């Protein structure tokens, strides 16, 4: 089944409407780096917030953390990243393009058919040096995952949080991987934002918790509007498991380039805590008072990308519809993800309409992300809001000045209802929570 939208359309919409721009564009761009524009920054923030809410705030068994990107180099020796976080790299002897040996078919260069070098292992961590002296001892790495910041703080969190196992520690932050090949817009980039949960459990209960988190994470995408038929689960084969993993599932999404990983949920066992205990000399275990025993917990890790989630939400929300003979492009984004919740649109830029429209904007903007737009025709402004996925537009017309009522236009149904200005905030709040709001009693206040 082909995906209904090609990536070019998504990239072009993102550029046109201020969601995502190529990085350093005025200098010709920088490969696989992207900047989030005024609408994109809101969308990305909403994705992050939705994850944090469901993982941290709505549970009493998970706490949050924000650790530094630069860490002691010993961390990466212990975690196995210095030795094992590598991809086999081959180079074409004629055109000098570089490829991941395990990602190409056949013997020759996929571009020109030229002869390839023997594969050599290429470490994906970005190396830099700390302090003013560039020497071996000052070499540090940009973190390739946020997980290790969590493992090295396991003891700090356990002793200060007064929580019992099972206990999760969650973190959102930038990670860096010097991928040999990148692409498909924001799907694979060298700098990206991770949303990771390390959920520590008693050994023996790990398989059960793995199943639990696979389901929990799958449902998260569905609850936020991703269609179930565009999602699937795939268990890793024994030969593709990462060096730390006992078992792993990918939640895959049907991206325009085909089924690809959206999120991985791995059973990391006790690998990380044991390694850090060995390399740091600090004991990292848990005393289970109820069972009266001490053990090294196992850990279940749902690991998602903010950018990759943004891309899946955009693709799944994208639609081109024909409304009364006219084409409209619309993002049916879930209301909690939409960059702008409400647009205040006076029918035209008119000195009589402006004061009431501004008054409404000022009243709404402390509660919802609200946009004010009074330039161009109302039709064009509706189309602009549809393209960024604004769920509700509020239109102020000349009648509004007389009857103190305004029109709410719904993005998906295109239904228009007229409501009293005084009730507007309450009605929008209910609608943005997904509650139905019966406006019929309000009609009694309408004079005609
Ligand atoms: Zn070549």
Image (spheres, grey):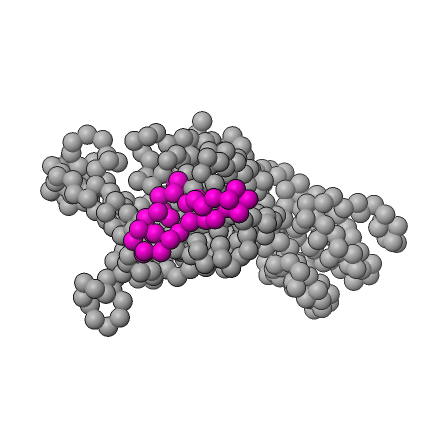
Is residue 418 found left or right of 233 in the rendered image?
Answer: right
Residue 69 or residue 259, whichever sits in front: 69
* Magenta highlight range: 268-297
Marks counted in the figure total: 0
Residue 252: percent from left, percent from top:
44, 35
Query: Would you say 343 lies left or right of 195 here?
Result: right
Q: Is residue 351 visible?
A: yes
Residue at 47% in and 41% down: 202
Residue 144 percent coordinates (x, y): 33, 52
Depth check, front residue: 3 or 137:
137
Magenta highlight on residue 411? no
Task: Please give the name of the residue rendered at 78% of the width and 56% of the height, measured from the top-left corner.
Answer: 423
Q: Quadrant of the N terminus?
A: top left
Q: Quadrant of residue 357?
A: bottom right
Residue at 34%, 29% (x, y): give it.
237
Q: Position of residue 368 (x, y in %)?
A: 64, 58
- Name the foreground residue: 427 vs 165: 165
18 is higher (above) or lower (below) than 415:
below
Residue at image coords 38%, 43%: 270
The answer to whether residue 138 is left or right of residue 297 is left
Q: Is residue 41 visible?
A: no
Q: Which quadrant would residue 261 be assigned to in this image?
A: top left
Give yes or no for residue 279 being in the magenta stretch.
yes
């Amino acid at each position: 089944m082909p995906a209904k939208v090609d990536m070019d359309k998504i990239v072009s919409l993102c550029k046109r409407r201020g969601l995502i721009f190529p990085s350093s564009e005025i200098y010709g761009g920088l490969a696989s780096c992207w900047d989030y524009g005024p609408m994109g920054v809101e969308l990305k923030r909403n994705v992050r917030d939705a994850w944090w809410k469901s993982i941290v705030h709505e549970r009493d068994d998970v706490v949050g953390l924000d650790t530094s990107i630069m860490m002691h180099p010993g961390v990466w020796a212990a975690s196995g990243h210095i030795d094992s976080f590598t991809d086999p790299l081959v180079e074409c002897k004629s055109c000098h393009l570089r490829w991941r040996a395990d990602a190409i078919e056949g013997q020759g260069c996929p571009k020109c058919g030229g002869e390839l070098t023997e594969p050599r292992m290429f470490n994906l961590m970005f190396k830099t040096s700390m302090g003013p002296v560039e020497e071996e001892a000052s070499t540090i790495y940009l973190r390739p995952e946020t997980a290790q910041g969590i493992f090295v703080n396991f003891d700090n969190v356990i002793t200060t949080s007064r929580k019992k196992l099972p206990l999760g520690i969650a973190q959102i932050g930038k990670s860096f991987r010097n991928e040999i090949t990148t692409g498909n817009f924001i799907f694979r980039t060298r700098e990206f934002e991770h949303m990771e949960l390390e959920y520590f459990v008693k050994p023996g209960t790990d398989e059960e918790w793995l199943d639990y988190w696979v389901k929990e994470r799958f449902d998260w995408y569905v609850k936020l509007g991703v269609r179930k038929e565009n999602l699937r689960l795939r268990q890793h084969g024994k030969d593709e498991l990462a060096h730390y993993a006992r078992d792993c599932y990918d939640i895959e999404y049907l991206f325009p380039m085909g089924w690809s990983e959206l999120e991985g949920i791995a059973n990391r066992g006790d690998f990380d805590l044991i390694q850090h205990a060995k390399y740091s000399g600090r004991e990292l275990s848990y005393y289970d008072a109820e069972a009266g025993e001490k053990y090294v917990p196992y850990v279940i890790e749902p690991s998602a990308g903010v950018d990759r989630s943004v891309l899946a939400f955009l693709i799944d929300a994208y639609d081109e519809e024909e409304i009364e003979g006219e084409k409209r492009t619309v993002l049916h984004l879930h209301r909690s993800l939409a960059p702008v919740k409400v647009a205040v649109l006076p029918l035209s830029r008119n000195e009589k309409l402006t004061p009431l429209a501004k008054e409404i904007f000022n009243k709404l903007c402390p509660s919802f992300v609200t946009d004010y737009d009074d330039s161009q025709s109302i039709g064009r402004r509706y189309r602009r809001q549809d393209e960024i996925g604004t769920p509700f537009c509020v239109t102020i017309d000349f009648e509004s000045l007389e009857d103190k009522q305004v029109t709410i236009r719904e993005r998906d149904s295109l239904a228009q209802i007229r409501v009293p200005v005084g009730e507007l905030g309450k009605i929008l709040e209910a609608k943005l929570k997904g509650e139905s709001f019966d406006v019929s009693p309000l009609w009694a206040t309408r004079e005609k």
